[in-house]
Each structure stands twice: as structure tokens, then as C-alpha cells.
Image (cartoon, rainbow, N blue to C red):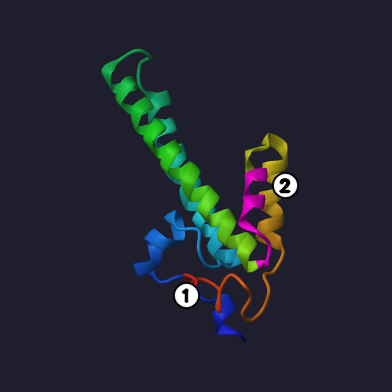
Amino acid sequence: MNTDRTRLPDSSNLTWLFFKISGRVSRAAYFLGGLLVAIIQAFPLYRFTLVPEGSAESNMWSFIFFIAFIASLWSNIALAVKRLHDLDKPGIAALILFVPVVSIVAFLLLCLFPGQPGPNRYGRRTNEPAQP
């Protein structure tokens, strides 16, 4: 079993995983990272629905949702770029995630298709930043 393909990124690489676009990520790391981002987006939205409309608490949760959405937007792009790199495809193709229905299909495809084994032009190994 190739441990490079099955291991997840180190917890010390969380900043890289969610905010940098260099390197490659596996299907599992992409899916789990995307799931975490979705939960981070959903929580403030859920809390917003529980409070009275127009209240100070409602304003607070809508602001928290806005901040979470902006941060998660970049995180989704960074994850998709690294996943595309693992498939030896250019990261610019991550822009397809902005097309409403296509984005769901693209997410599923990125979760299903295995990456390129061994080194490629985007990095030596999966689930780590590209080495210069």
C-alpha cells in the first residue's frame, strides 16, 4: 500500500491545506476538508435561523456567517486547486466551482477520481506543499 496516497496532511499543515494553493491533496483530504468548510459555513447560518429577525443577535450571526463564507470561499478554491494539481491539471480549472450546478458535479468528480501516483509537475508527494 502506498502510504503517500493514504495519509492525510499533518495538523501542522492546516494553514497550507486551507489557504495555500501550492502542492497536492488526495481525494480523502479534499473531501474531509470540504466537509469541514461546509460545517463552518453552516453553523453560523443555523444559529442565524434560531434568533429573532432584526435583533442584535441576528446581526451578529449574519456578520459571522459573512466572515465564515468569505474565508471558506478561499478555502474551497485552495482545496480544489490542490486537488486538480494531484490530477496533474492546472489550478485555474477550479473556477468551474463558481458555476452553480456544475460545481456540485465538479466536487463529486474531484472526490471520485484518483490522483496521479508518484511525483508530477505540482509536487513530489500528495498531501504536502510543493517543494521548490
Residue 60 point in image, percent of width and height: 30, 25
Q: Is residue 114 left or right of residue 123?
A: right
Quarter in which the N terminus is drawn: bottom right
**At which x and y percent is residue 53?**
38, 14
Which residue is at the front of the view, 102 or 37?
102
Residue found at the far top of this picture: 54
Residue type pointed to by label 2: Val
Name the foreground residue: 37 vs 24: 24
Q: Residue at x 38, y 59 (%)?
A: 15
Residue 42 is tagged as none
Say which quarter of the image contains residue 89. Answer: bottom right
The amino acid on which the numbered mark 1 sits, given as a three-letter code, is: Pro
Where disc 2 sits, the SS reads helix
* 71 relative to 77 in the view: left or right: left
- In the picture of the structure, the residue carrying the numbered disc 1 is 132
User: Which residue, given by chain and number where applicable, does mark 2 sit on?
Assistant: 105
Q: Quadrant of residue 114?
A: bottom right
Q: Which residues are magenta?
A: 87-96
**Relative image position of residue 6 (x, y in whole percent):** 57, 76
